Image: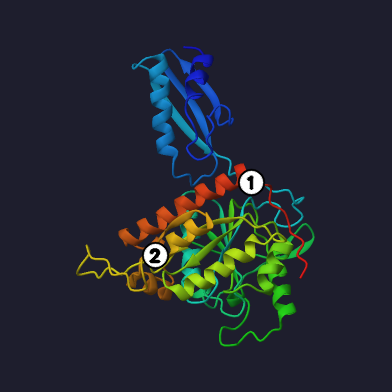
Amino acid sequence: MIQQDILAALATVQEPDLGKDLVALNMIKDIAIDGRSVSFTLVLTTPACPLKELMRRDCEQAIRSRCGDDVSVQVKFTAQTSSNRADGRALLSDVKNIIAVVSGKGGVGKSTISANLALALAQGGARVGLMDADIYGPSMPIMFGIRGERPLMMEVEGKDKIVPIEKYGIKIISMGLLVDEKSAVVWRGPMVSSAIRQFVSDVYWGELDYLIIDMPPGTGDIHLTLVQTVPVTGAIVVTTPQDVALADARKAISMFAQAQIKVPIIGLVENMAWFTPAELPNNRYYIFGKEGGRRMADQFDIPFLGEIPIVQGIREGGDLGVPIMESEDAITKEAFTRFADNAIRSISMRNANMDATQVVEVVV
């Protein structure tokens, strides 16, 4: 065997989402051959890649098909998280992907989706930050069990920076960590927009593969401020199956699709999709309707990222500061993991196939 044999074999293996072979994508590194043994490194587009075992098997099969069944194949993995920024990286320069989690209305579980998406990414090995941009109703301090904690300050390149609080391997910042939770935030729009800019410019996020931003419900000042301040890789829309939630989700999709904004929709996730009682684990009750989110995703031709059931443990975990992805609830963890896997794949495809992200100029 020689290196050209291995490259020729691996050139027949496609990256499942990007539609090109691993050699053309420059994903093969450090090929080493010793007799009938070969090893190489496969460079993934994210540490949390859900398809790495599939690609490992495809690589092993391709090499043995070309070079013989007796070849010993060792595939090592490393990751270089995909990013496609064209903004000069003036702000959040070390953050590769900025993902806004949005909804047209409140009460659909957007914060729960944001928290558990961040956890799923971190558990997959990615470096993750979580910004609670819901200034008036911050919930991350409760959901992560960090109520009453205060972030520290540190000097970075001659400037004072706020250091996010870390929990479960995630860097977290929230207005709930900066003000007394008993005090209401009574601010006009410009002050809220200023706070969002401060979360971006005055917080020391460091190097991140993903910054998840839990946005307030609706379509307003904070959303416009965000896309005018940083290059948003894309938005994940959260809805529930009932018509009133779907109607408001349409507004969120339409806002980001406007010609003057043009932030790609990473996909849509349907929360509270069904209820399964513990004593009847094989039963599903579609309390709020069935598959409304899937139909909407098809209507707008955007990826459908998954369905999350109504489970008592999700509410209990959020109240106790232990999100469901840190629990032992296998069924719900599986639903969130599938959703996160689909989101990761959609982000990678967005970076490979769409225009580079940049700060937008919004004229209203």
Give me the disc on residue 324: 2
Identify which amino acid the numbered label 1 is placed on. Answer: Met
Quarter of the rendering containing residue 231: bottom right
Q: How far apart are the alpha carbons under marks 2 and 1? A: 33 Å
Residue type at mark 2 is Ile
Residue at left 53%, top 58%? 300
- Residue at x 46% of width, y 51% of height: 342
Measured as percent of width and height from the top left, residue 38 is found at 45, 20
Percent position of residue 315, x then y: 39, 74
The answer to whether marks 2 and 1 mark residues whose Cβ atoms lie closer than 8 Å is no
Residue at point 64% right, 84% down? Answer: 185
The residue singled out by tag 1 in the image is 354
Point 32% across, 69% down: residue:
286
Q: Which mark is residue 183?
A: none
Tell which of 183 and 340 is nearer to you.
340
Work out whether 276 lies above or below 185.
above
Residue 201 percent across, percent down from the top left = 73, 64
Q: Residue furthest right?
A: 158
